[in-house]
Image: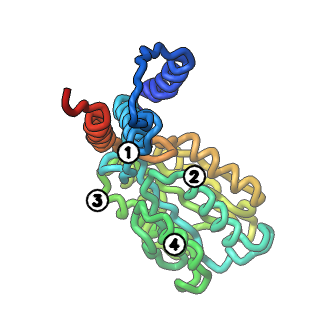
Amino acid sequence: MNFQFFPALLAFPLFLLFTFLLSRNPKVISQTYSGPFSFQSISGSPGFRTAVFLQFAGIALLCIALARPQQGFERLPEAGEGVDIIITLDVSGSMTQTDYYPSRLAAAKRAALIFIDGRPNDRIGLVIYAEQPRTLCPPTFDHATLERFIQSAELGALPDGTAIGAGLAIAAKGFNYSQTARRVIVLISDGEDTSSQLDPITVAKAINTLHGDSLRIYTVGIGKPLSEDGLGLDIETLSYIADLNGGRLFNVESPEELDEVYSAIDSLEASTLPAEGLFVYRDSYMFFLISGMILMLISSIMKYRFFKVVGD
């Protein structure tokens, strides 16, 4: 619960202090009575003490109402808020190599999970690709489900090969229903395009034409550059894709550097929404106000009955 005017809560302890100071030196007007009857002190009776307790409780509730208590209800970001992100993950056979412990794919998945945990207010999706691409999860706020898809992304789910162009095209298609002004593709690859019917550079140019500055592509290269025998990472193509679409190439050589890549992307594409979540606050002072007034009324009625004088 949140209090809009917190200092009002101090009014009740100040009232108690003021009442205590007054009770130390009470001004009592005494009268002498002689007769055959004995009277119990009104102020010492259980009914009177109950009336006083209700009076203090009512004042406490009124002070709480004056502080204007509010309750917060978490809401999901609306369309057009935050950043839409699609992680495009290479699951070809070369991702089994253990130069990244325990494997390239395992290291890439672990870093992606850390990245997702740090962006609770952004829609994030997952595309995997080998010889063919496949959308496992469209951009969503349901990060728990997304994380299960990432953990289940294994080698052998698709025919072996590396279709960077096709994977990139499917990732861009995943933004067809996106209403955000900022969209990001994180493309992870450890090789060169060997299986696409779509040339990666041609796809990158088409994305730039269709989306312009609203879609950025960050490419992440895992492994060693192309060797003379044609095996390895196609740095030149990945760099061109990123530069053309306002992104950046990250060439990483260790799992630790992979973590740093996601941290860099996180800072470059900072969410416009607060990390602690979005809340709608509603006033809830009415309950305390009505309850306090009822208790004060009951207390007044009880005191009136105790002090009422019957007869002359």
Mark 4 vs mark 2: in front: 2
- Marks 1 & 2, CB-CB < 8 Å contact: no
Which circle marks residue 71 in the picture?
A: 1
Q: Which residue is mark 4?
A: 128
> Amino acid type of disc 1?
Gln
Residue name at image x 30 percent, y 51 percent: 79
In the image, residue 12 sits, relative to residue 129, either above or below, namely above
Q: Which residue is mark 3?
A: 177
Mark 1 vs mark 3: in front: 1
Depth order, front residue of 93/286: 286
Quarter of the rendering containing residue 289: top left
| Quadrant including the N terminus | top left
> Amino acid type of disc 2?
Gly
How far apart marks 4 and 3 lie (CA) works out to 20 Å
First-in-chain label (4 vs 3): 4
Residue name at image x 54 percent, y 50 percent: 240
